[in-house]
Structure formats: C-alpha cells, structure tokens
Amino acid sequence: MYGGYWGKVLRVNLTNKTYKVEPLSEKVAKDFIGGAGVGIKYLYDEVPAGTDPLSPENKLIFATGPLTGTRTPSTSRLALATKSPLTGIVCLSLSGGHFPVEFKNTGHDVLIIEGKSEEPVYLYIKDDQVEFRPADKLWGTTTHDCEHLIKTWLNDHNIRVASIGPAAENMSKIASIMNDRNRAFGRRGTGTVMASKNLKAIAVKGTKKVSIASEDAFKEVHAKMLKAFKEAPGLYPALGQHGTSSVIEILWGLGACPAKNFSATGEWNPVPGLGIATLSAKKIGKEPCYGCPVACTQVRLVKEGRYKGTVSPPEYETVFALGAQCGIDNVDAIIYGDRLCNELGLDSISTGVTIGFAMELYERGIITKEDTGGLELKFGNEEAMLELIRQMAYREGFGAVLADGTKAAAEKIGRGAEKYAMIIKGIEMPGYDPRALKTHGFSFATTYTGADHNKGYASQDVFGSPVPEPVDRLDPKGKGRITKWNQDAKAACCDAAVMCNFVFDAHYMPGPLEHMAELFNAVCGYDFTAEDVMKVGERINNLARAFNVREGISRKDDTFPERILTEPLKEGGSKGSYIPREQLDMMLDEYYEVRGWNKNGIPTEEKLKELGLEYVIEDLKKMGCL
Amino acid sequence: MIKIKVITGSEIAKIIGAHEKIIYLPEGATVNDFLTYLKTEYGEPMEKFLFKSNRELSQVVMVNGKNIAFLEGKDTKLKDGDEIFLVPIAAGG
C-alpha cells in the first residue's frame, strides 16, 4: 500500500453486531486520495438511488486521508459521507479535534457503519478490537456528558469520543455528531442518521502510527509549509489570535454580512456588538485541533450578567446564525446559545437561520403568538432565540415546528412562508450574502452539498486572494471558471487530503497545487503533478454530482432563494447588487461548460470517461439522465 | 485636503488604535500615497503588516468595496469621502 494509508476499511454491521476488515484498494486510494473522495466513492457504490436516509440501508462512512496521522500540520480531520435526511442528497461533513487522528491510529483508513441496532449502543474501537456496548443509560444525555461518562466508565480519559445529543435522539433533521466536546460533523443531519441506527457514540483509542513514503522529501516540504504559514498575514495574526469570527468585520466592510434573515445585509452593523474588540474581551484561551500550530478556535467565557460562567468557542458561522441572522448583538447570549447547540447536538447554522426565518415571519404577521406558544418572536429577542434552541432539540412547543429546519417549517406553516426560506437544495444558507460575494455565493448554488461555504470557499471574494487569480466579486462574468477551480482544489487538497481549509487558503504560496502535489508525493509516494491533484478534485465533484443526479438533481436545483434573485442590497459596501435570474443563467451556462456538463447540469459521457468514471455512465443512462 | 475613512478588521486595527479611522490626505492622493502615509505615521509594525518580505502587499486594499486590482492598482486616485478597506489575505469559515 502507498504511504500514509493503512489500506484497511473497518466495516461494522449494527444489525448483526459484527465487524470485518476489508482492504482499501490502491486504485481507489490514488483516484480519490482519501477523506471526502473515498467517502463519496463508497457512498456512490453502496447507497443506491432512492434509499431512505433514515433507514438501515443508509450508511455512515467515515474516511481519513493520507495526511491525517502524519506530521503534516493541521490535518487532524475526518470526513463523513452519508445520505442527508435534510436534503436527500450527498452529505459530506468534516470535523477536526483529536478524534480523527485517534481513529487513524487504530490502524484503519475508513469506518463504514451499516444496519441498525435494535437497542441503543455505542462502539468502542481500540486498535483492531471493536466492542458493541450498551448505551441505554447514555440515551438522553447531552454530548458533553455522554463523552465524559464514556471516558469515565472505560476508565481512560485519553479515549476520543464522537456522540449525538438529545436533538438527534428526537430525530431533528438538523442534528450534528459532536466530537471532542465542541467539534462537529455539522450540517445536513449527520446526527439524525446516527440516531436512526440507535448508535449513541463512537469511542476510539489508537496506538499505531502510519508510515510515510519518504522522510527526506517530507522534511523538505514540511519546512516549506511552516515557513509559508509564518509569512501568511491572515494565519497567525488573524486566525490564530481572533479565530474565524475575525471575518465578521471584513464582511461588514464588504457589505456581505447577512442580517435579519438576509433582509438587512449592509444595514445592520454587527461590529459594535459582535466585532473583534467585544469578542477578544471574552477570550480565555484556545482549543486547537491535534497538531495544529494555528489554533483558531478561541474559547470564550461570559464574565458578567445572566449568562455568567458560560464557556464556549463560537465560530464565525455561529456568531452570524445566532447573532446577526436573528438581529441579536449580545455576544454573551450567542456564547450561551453555542453551548446549548453543542450540548444538545444541533447544527448552529441551521438552527439560527431557521429561528431568524421564523422571526421574519413573525415581524411580517405571517405567524403570531398563537403559533409561537406566546413567544414574542421579534428580531433581537435573545430569550426567544435561546428558548427555541431548547424547544427544537426536544420537539416541544413551537420548536417542534422548527426542529427539522427551515424547509420543513415553511411547509408546515404554509401561508407563503417559503418566500422567506433562505435555503439552497433544502439546507440553510451560511453567513455570506451571495449578492455581495458572487463567486462565493455561486458556489453555494452549485456545490454538491447544497448551501455550503466550505466546499468551494472563494477566498478571492472575501479576502482578495490572488490565487489562482483575483476576481471582481460583483461582476458575474468568469464565475463558472473560478468556482470550478475553488471546488476542485478544495475537494482534493482539503476535503480528501484531509487538511484544514484555513491553512490551504492562507499559506497561499505561489502555486499551492504544486505544493500539495509535493506533499502527496512525499507522504504517499505518488507521482502527482498539480494537474493530477486538480483531476482528483474534479473526479470527486463529478461523482458527487452523479450521486445527486441519481436522486433527481439538475439545473432547476442550482439556484438561490427568491430574495437573492429579486431584492437588491439596500445599503453597505455592495449596495444595489443582486443576482437576477438571467445573471444566474449566464453563470450556470459558463459553469456547466467548463465542467463538461450538459445544459441541464448533468455530467456528459465524455467527461465521465475522461475522469475514469465509466461505471457512472451506465447508471445515469439507466435512470434516463444521459 | 480630502477626507478618507480607513476601515480594517485585521491586526492593523491594533496599530492604529481603532477599526475605523478618518485621515486626511492631499488633493490628488493615490493609494500609494495612502500606504506611504500609513508607513510614515505608524512605522515598522505597520510596514510588517502591510508588506511581505518580498515587498508585495500582504493586505488587500479595497476602495469603496472594490479591490484595487480592478481599479488602477496602487495608482488608483482617491477622492474626498472615499472608504478604504484593508483586508488580510486569510481564510475564514
């Protein structure tokens, strides 16, 4: 097997309580690298079209990459591929912390969980051993308590745990899997799939160390990488000191920080309440992932007032979703809300965006106190926001209406509510307004997971990155080409490798792809060029698209909420900008052309052949898509 | 003199003591003059954050929300009331 891999897939069947180890084929490893690539490959092959995401036939496919568990910094990342109960298409979530490296150290590259246990269980994977342990007593615990209890009962606090909380147990479709307390396999209902299998947690303990192909070559590329880290202006000084929430001021400056359900972007100023100065005053330390010198996660403590004593590390997206999206500028309430989401196992983006959506409905009189169980659901009402988080996790009161996210809530409420649903392919939008960041926004409309800021992050828009070229963020031209670059580069270099997005963006040495090729070659013994790396990214995006096409996705789904298509921004650094439908059509035509997809957004036979995905052609033909 | 509003969310805020600051530059000033003003006013720490070791800018400069790469680069002319935004080339999520 190549360096960086064990060449082993651990397959666990919860129905029969059995497990076996299968080889990871060298061809799959090289064609897809690992992480998201290998995860999506298994998902495509083993979860056929039409599978109910909450049935025993759906699978949880955890995949590490070849860099994880080596000395490459910022690579304690693990990808999870499954079919999303929220969107009905590919769910690909990545989490950091310590769990990913610990799992890799058990001597496996991939963990596939299939079937369904009759009673609640948790898995304990200790190197080659797998134990199915009863979890009836853990059912009902929060993620933090579950993690603590498992470590205590196994009498080993060095064990790493990923678990679900009450939100998943109550089958909320926006429930996450949490690991190492505050790390999340977030978005798209990963936790819900785990709950549907009666699996409360996965505990791992690994003592092995994966070997790499060339120590000498690695030493050289490692030194180059650390030097680039040091020189990157946005890495140690910005991300290392202030974390992801430092982006809030940049977004405000660009007129791109969404507020009040995207109705007040550029008008509602988040900086006084949620800016760096306010957040810095709450910082008490950091919570780095294993082996990351940047340590972007900033732990914050509320020192005064009604939330006094609360500790949590809200990222930018949570500050946006529970804050600006709901018109709330009290950062203490956000720290408290972040803690609630993490312990109850709710995705904070989907939760906050859904609550903000309900607030707009309330302000417009579409819903009233009769619907909300007496809650005065106005923008800015932090008590209502926090109460709804709890209600959503336990499906109580009005929370039961919101528990499955915005799309389901809009359907339940009716009365024209869907007009205000800020979703793409069924998932809530993250905290970037596409009207102000057209490259970044266009990626939300086209990426294989639905509205997702991490599958093709456009640093060119947000931070003015000149790699591979600078873009004019408000000009719709050229967005197809640059979006393809972002999505393919991130798929291979970050999500498959697996490496943190932030360091890939920020280390930004000339030729990041050449650098990544050198890294893969040193670790795995490959002979990759920059083009080969991009080809892997393209293969991953095409296979994921093919999975979605099999589920009925096409051009009609690559779109924005009505507000983005029809309402120009009223104030701020992008005043007047929006994405009218004809502009979106132009961007889609360009994107499909550079992707080698037909006008309906389906990968063509030629493109699939070029990428070595011949087996997909037959599938799509059978479905009548090609 | 023309009045320019400087907005920054980066470490530069620490150096200039605020996230937003009003400064005055002579009529006809360019982005290059603005950068020179910052270097002169705030010395070495500012220079360290503005430029990489190879003298390339390590910050993105935007004038009224537009990257100067799409204007006239460092020769972009400034006018009264302009807003200059300094953004570190970084990442976020």
Image (tube, coloured by chain):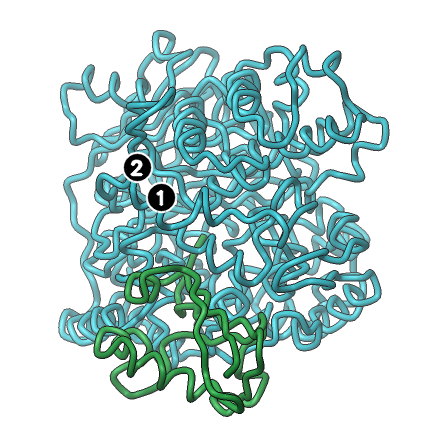
Q: CA distance from mark 1 to mark 2?
A: 8 Å
Chain containing the residue with disc 2: A
Q: Say above or below: A353 vs A230.
A: above
Amino acid bearing label 1: Leu
**Where does the image place residue B67, in percent across and percent down from the top left?**
54, 77
Q: Residue furthest top?
A: A137
Read off the residue under disc 1: A279
Q: Nearer the viewer, residue A126 or A168?
A: A168
As drawn, is A590 to the left or to the right of B84?
right
Whichever of callouts 1 and 2 sits on the residue coming sooner in the sequence is 1
**Chain represented in green:** B
- In the picture, which chain is cyan? A
Q: Is residue A302 left or right of residue A598?
A: left
Q: Is residue A153 left or right of residue A558?
A: left
Residue type (three-letter) at the residue carrying disc 2: Arg
Share a chain, discs 1 and 2? Answer: yes
- Residue at image x 77%, y 22%? A367
